[in-house]
Amino acid sequence: MNIGYQKFSVNGSRYLYDTTTNAIVKISETVYRILDDYLIHDAEYILKNYTVDISYEDLREALEWLKNAINLCCMLQPFFPKDFKTILNKSYIKSALASGIRQMALNITEQCNLRCSYCIYSGIYLSERTHNNFTMTWDIARRSIDYFVTHRKKGHKGNIAFYGGEPLIKWNLVKKCIKYIRNYCDPDQLDMNIITNGTLLNKEIIQTLVDLEVNLYISLDGPRDVHDEYRKYKTGEGTYDHLIKTVKMIKVNFPQYYQKRIIFNGTFHIKNDILEIADFANQGLFSNIPFRLNTIKTTDTDVKLFTEKEYKEHHKRLDILLDRYLESLFNDNDFPYGLIHHVFGNVFTTLSTRQVGFSNNCGAPRGICVPGTVRLFVSSDGTFHVCEKFCPPGYDIGNCKIGIDVDKVRNLLEEVVSMSEELCQKCWAYRLCSHCFIHVLDRGKITIDQKRKNCERTKQKLLKSLERFVYLWERENPDAVNNPNTLHAHVLNNRK
């Protein structure tokens, strides 16, 4: 089929996602049934072959609707050829790099005081390093900071994150860095984040973060039984009790900082109950504090992380969570809206912010950035990588001494673009897709087979997201647009 579209059903009603216009429309049962054949054959074929169980009047009405959709609304058009070569032009790459970097993450140390079972550095992921004692030197940190500050995107609030391992193992280096950065940029110009497991925090550290206005991302997966199943000290002891004691200390002693600059960052395993975690995130200690969940990495490993049954049970619970969300809008209940927006990112971000209308803007595959323009990851030895999720050996893009290497950037892009030329030309999900470099990585190498696998997974997820988008859209209460947490508000704000 040379036309991009996807039919789907929600509670007995029929819908169509059209790739050409990026529109979602409700269609009749008759249009739903005849659409595939109509696009292959013609109206005469439909009238000849469908009159056995569909009335002539319904068929004529459906055919008229399809004719108008195609001729007047420009829906259901043939795929137009996509030329992704623009992003490979060196002048284009240099121009993109000249516009500046938005974010940088410094891998302060590869040491960690925990041994979380799902950690990407635990040894079960074949492309990733394992825990070791490598630590960034002050010279590498300073050079990297200088590079970012002089190359950051103009007119854009920059961001520098401190990453690990556990960065607070090297607190003195982190403190030296953040003081050095504040000499360059005040908080209105640049944010700083520390991503930490929270076990090494104390009043002295928090006071420094308060004084220098640094955001703190604390790893917390949920209630004790969930958190301690994965997040353990090297001894095997769980970290929940220690962490909660520290969190309470921060809330009591630094209440304004707690409300303004604390973010809880959970790692979610499909085996766990998302409903239990949502309830946990909505309780007093965490109420009105951002609580985000990131799923564990499920590729690049020979370990079977969950069963098909567990996957299906998880999606049943997700549907229950959506119903609880809708109920909260009608009953004005407290609800962890931020968590919902993060868990259902395809619904509240991808679909609600999509641009409806024809677009042939395809100088680059969707989801692919020019490496070094969005998020630059600096490993502990000073090597530059695309981001913290894509840093396998052989795919670096420079270092803190020479800066970003344009040739390395282009070579990396060329590998990925060649795959997109083959697989993205006639894909119904192209305009919703956000495949980036991590989706083509398998066992430390970029492979088209891995992209194919992830393409199928992504299309399945997007189809489910389309169903959930419509489900919420048609059930949010009439005043939903006035509530900034709703899907209607998200869509309206994007249209402004």
Image: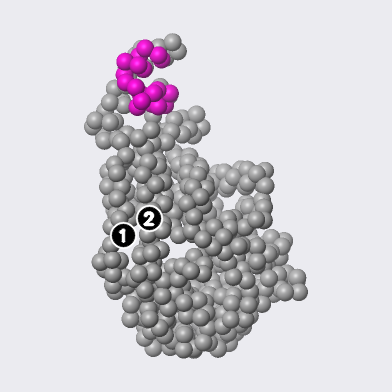
Seen as rendered, the residue at the extreme top is 52
Badge 1 marks a residue whose secondary structure is helix
Could you say which quadrant of the image residue 201 lies in?
A: bottom right
Residue at the spot x=38%, y=84% of the render? 146
Q: Position of residue 14 (x, y in %)?
A: 44, 30
Seen as rendered, the residue at the extreme left is 72
Left or right: 363, with 163 as reference point: left
Question: Front-most of 386 and 165?
Answer: 386
Residue at the spot x=51%, y=69% of the render? 393
Q: Amino acid at mark 2?
A: Val
Q: Report the quarter where the N terminus lies.
A: top left
Q: Position of residue 489 (x, y in %)?
A: 39, 51
Instruction: Give above or below for 134 relative to 433.
Output: below
Q: Which residue is mark 2?
A: 417
Q: Which residues are magenta?
A: 31-50
In magenta segment, residue 384: no
Left or right: 309, with 64 as reference point: right
Instruction: Give above or below for 245 relative to 58.
Output: below
Question: Front-most of 281 and 270?
Answer: 270
In magenta segment, residue 43: yes
Q: Which numbered disc, 1 or 2, marks the residue that appears first in the sequence?
A: 1
Q: Which residue is mark 1?
A: 87
Q: Position of residue 395 (x, y in %)?
A: 46, 67
Badge 2 marks a residue whose secondary structure is helix
Label 1 Cα neighbours within 10 Å, binned few <14 / some 14-19 / many ≥20: many
Question: Front-most of 443 and 118?
Answer: 443
